[in-house]
Image: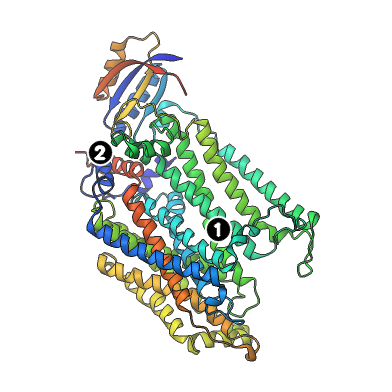
């Protein structure tokens, strides 16, 4: 199937540089797993782990004491936690974009980054899921969100509520992402298994590689499964952030009640996720010596994607303002003027600066191919997209229809510690992944290397 | 049951594709090939039929969709109907997101499980490794020996730059 299109995507320059052979691919990718961890890894791991512990303390205190430990009030009922939830779910979306959508679009460059991006998706969804879970206040009743037979009737969940759609969307998204990642990992686990001497590690890898032996009859079905998962993952990723946006769009709050929300949220999710992929890949490339696999060209392409999705997000910001003016709805108009010039103007303009203005530098090839510049700009996007969710949630809520119920919001130390803790959890998981599993899809990169050799004639 | 097979070891995907095509043209029965990655074009050279898994996936997706439709209708309109803002008991448009999610969930998880069962892959399965480098950088083509002469096959493989040739007994599992 892919062979048909190979002609169309055959490129003049190889995607994997350094004239790598397929044997070297195995060696290069397995090297960081087989050596001892570097000092840098230990420092990063310990810092992340400590931050994660901070989050554990904050969440434990909050669960034991109650939601009152947060800065929420009767008017601003959603703030930091839901911001973090939407932020982390958005981060995850780039992983699925790279693994599923770019696979369907035959973008061969994705093979260098898809494994790490999919891992990022899984960890980001775990971080995201924590927030609605702890926001329940009594997380031990969390199973009530599932339609389980019970002694209260059976009193069923309300299938008409977008919040319940979210439960199904997030759990499906997590499950399918994890399955997709594991299926992709399967042949590589076998590769690692066959390199190891007898011992515990080999037994663990043998267990999880499910007896994979490289049989082509298996590969043949495997390719079909992979394509099917990509085909299912593509509408899934669009549905997940659309449903997240329904949490807002189906309400009557000015600033939330807009039909632009689903595409705006999906574009924003991919924008933030791509930026996070860039942040992680630039670090991984340098610290794990993967320069031949994650090349400047990969960074360049991803920076273009950031520019594209960032421009869609910028257009959405402008559209919101235009529609508010054009609708002649005073509530809608007030909300947007309040966003740009009210008490949270600093958050609004941080968002615009980081999401709309600084990414414009990606129009210049010199910026896109300079790793330090891309790294800094990707951090800006991460900050900007966090503020976008904060602005949408808090500024729309804090000035209610009824001026007597207007309120302000400031996060408490517990909320800040929970956010910091979620970053700790994310990086702890990611560093463990880099240490114990192949960060690059060995099997897929080998196919690209072989393809490069046959089409470009780089045969050694 | 075991059978006698010929093994040819190759170093490049183009060689094994050509060797598989030539073996099939000469009427040999290709037992299997073992490769470090999914070699594109080898399926045609081996004459493999397209995978039937998309049909399984479609059936599983339809099952998930039907289940989600029934679940939401039955819980909301039949078992314990609750008036939510005066909406109809059977609020079909509001059920679409969950119908979609459960369809994707059952199609995706189901097709992977079907694949694992069909190829008999599982946590306690011992891998039958034909060559230790088959998950690394070697390509192995396995032909059924039948009544054919090992020298003919050896020459056929050598014509396609095989680096090793072997005749052995192999467990016939799949």
Q: Nearer the viewer, residue A261 or A89?
A: A89
Which is more foreground, mark 1 or mark 2? 1
Q: Nearer the viewer, residue A77 or B135?
A: A77
- Left or right: residue B40 versus residue A263 is left
Q: Nearer the viewer, residue A37 or A20?
A: A37
Residue B2 image offset from top left, x and y in percent: 43, 15
Residue A376 visible in the picture:
yes
Q: Which residue is mark 1?
A: A170
Q: Decide: is A291 above or below B113.
A: below
User: Alpha-carbon neighbours of circle 2 within 10 Å: few (<14), some, or many (≥20)?
Assistant: some
Residue in view at x 63 percent, y 88 percent = A405
Residue in view at x 38 percent, y 78 percent = A357
- Left or right: residue A262 versus residue A272 is right
Q: Which subunit holds the residue at mark 1? A: A
Identify the image quadrant of residue B19. top left
Q: Decide: is A5 above or below A280.
A: above
- Left or right: residue A305 versus residue A73 is left
Q: Decide: is A357 above or below A24.
A: below
Q: Which residue is mark 2?
A: A23
Residue B105 image offset from top left, x and y in percent: 58, 49
Residue A315 visible in the picture:
no
Do marks 1 and 2 share a subunit? Answer: yes
In primary-sequence order, the first of circles 1 and 2 is 2
Q: Secondary structure at mark 1?
A: helix
Q: Which subunit holds the residue at mark 2? A: A
| Whether label 1 touches label 2, CB < 8 Å | no
Residue in view at x 33 percent, y 61 percent = A280
Q: Nearer the viewer, residue B19 or B31?
A: B31
Residue B9 image offset from top left, x and y in percent: 29, 25
Identify the image quadrant of residue B89. bottom right
């Amino acid at each position: 199937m892919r062979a048909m299109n190979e002609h169309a995507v055959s490129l003049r320059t190889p995607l994997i540089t350094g004239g790598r052979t397929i044997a070297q691919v195995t060696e290069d990718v397995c090297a960081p797993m087989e050596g001892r961890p570097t000092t840098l890894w230990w420092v990063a791991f310990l810092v992340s782990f400590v931050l994660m512990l901070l989050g554990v303390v904050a969440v434990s205190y909050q669960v034991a004491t109650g939601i009152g430990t947060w800065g929420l009030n009767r008017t601003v009922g959603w703030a930091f936690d839901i911001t973090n939830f939407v932020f982390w779910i958005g981060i995850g979306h780039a992983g699925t974009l790279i693994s599923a959508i770019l696979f369907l679009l035959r973008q061969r460059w994705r093979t260098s980054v898809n494994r790490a991006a999919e891992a990022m998706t899984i960890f980001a969804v775990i971080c995201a899921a924590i927030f609605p879970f702890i926001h329940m206040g009594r997380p031990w009743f969390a199973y009530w969100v599932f339609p389980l037979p019970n002694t209260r009737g059976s009193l069923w969940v309300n299938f008409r509520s977008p919040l319940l759609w979210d439960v199904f969307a997030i759990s499906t998204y997590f499950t399918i992402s994890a399955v997709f990642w594991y299926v992709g990992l399967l042949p590589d686990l076998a590769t690692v298994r066959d390199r190891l001497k007898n011992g515990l590690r080999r037994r663990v890898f043998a267990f999880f590689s499910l007896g994979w032996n490289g049989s082509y009859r298996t590969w043949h079905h495997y390719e079909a499964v992979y394509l099917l998962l990509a085909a299912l993952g593509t509408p899934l990723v669009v549905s997940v952030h659309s449903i997240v946006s329904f949490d807002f769009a189906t309400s009557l709050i000015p600033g939330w009640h807009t039909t632009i929300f689903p595409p705006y949220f999906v574009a924003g999710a991919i924008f933030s996720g791509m930026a996070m992929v860039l942040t992680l890949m630039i670090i991984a490339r340098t610290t794990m010596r993967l320069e031949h696999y994650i090349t400047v060209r990969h960074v360049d392409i991803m920076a273009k994607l950031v520019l594209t999705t960032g421009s869609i997000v910028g257009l959405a910001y402008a559209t919101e303002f235009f529609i508010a003016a054009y609708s002649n709805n005073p509530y809608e108009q007030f909300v947007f003027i309040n966003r740009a010039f009210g008490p949270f103007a600093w958050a609004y303009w941080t968002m615009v600066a980081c999401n709309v203005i600084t990414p414009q530098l990606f129009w210049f090839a010199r910026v896109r191919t300079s790793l330090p510049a891309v790294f800094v700009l990707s951090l800006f996007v991460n900050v900007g997209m966090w503020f976008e969710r904060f602005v949408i949630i808090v500024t729309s809520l804090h000035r209610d229809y009824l001026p007597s119920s207007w309120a302000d919001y400031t996060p408490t130390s517990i909320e800040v510690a929970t956010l910091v803790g979620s970053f700790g959890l994310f990086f702890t998981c990611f560093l463990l992944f880099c240490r114990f599993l192949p960060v690059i899809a060995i099997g897929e990169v080998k196919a690209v290397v072989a393809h490069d050799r046959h089409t470009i004639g780089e045969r050694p | 049951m075991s059978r006698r097979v010929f093994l040819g070891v190759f170093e490049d995907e183009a060689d094994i594709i050509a060797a598989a095509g030539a073996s099939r043209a000469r009427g040999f029965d290709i037992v299997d090939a073992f490769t470090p990655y999914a070699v594109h074009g080898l399926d045609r050279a081996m004459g493999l039929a397209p995978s039937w898994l998309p049909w399984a996936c479609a059936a599983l997706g339809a099952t998930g969709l039907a289940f989600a439709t029934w679940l939401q209708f039955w819980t909301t309109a039949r078992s314990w109907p609750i008036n939510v803002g005066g909406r109809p008991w059977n609020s079909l448009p509001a059920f679409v997101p969950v119908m979609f999610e459960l369809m994707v969930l059952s199609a995706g998880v189901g097709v992977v499980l079907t694949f694992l069962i069909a190829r008999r892959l599982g946590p306690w399965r011992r891998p039958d490794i034909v060559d230790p480098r088959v998950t690394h950088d070697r390509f192995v083509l396995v032909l059924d020996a039948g009544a054919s002469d090992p020298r003919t096959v050896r020459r056929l493989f050598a014509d396609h730059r095989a680096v090793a040739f072997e005749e052995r007994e192999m467990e016939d599992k799949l």
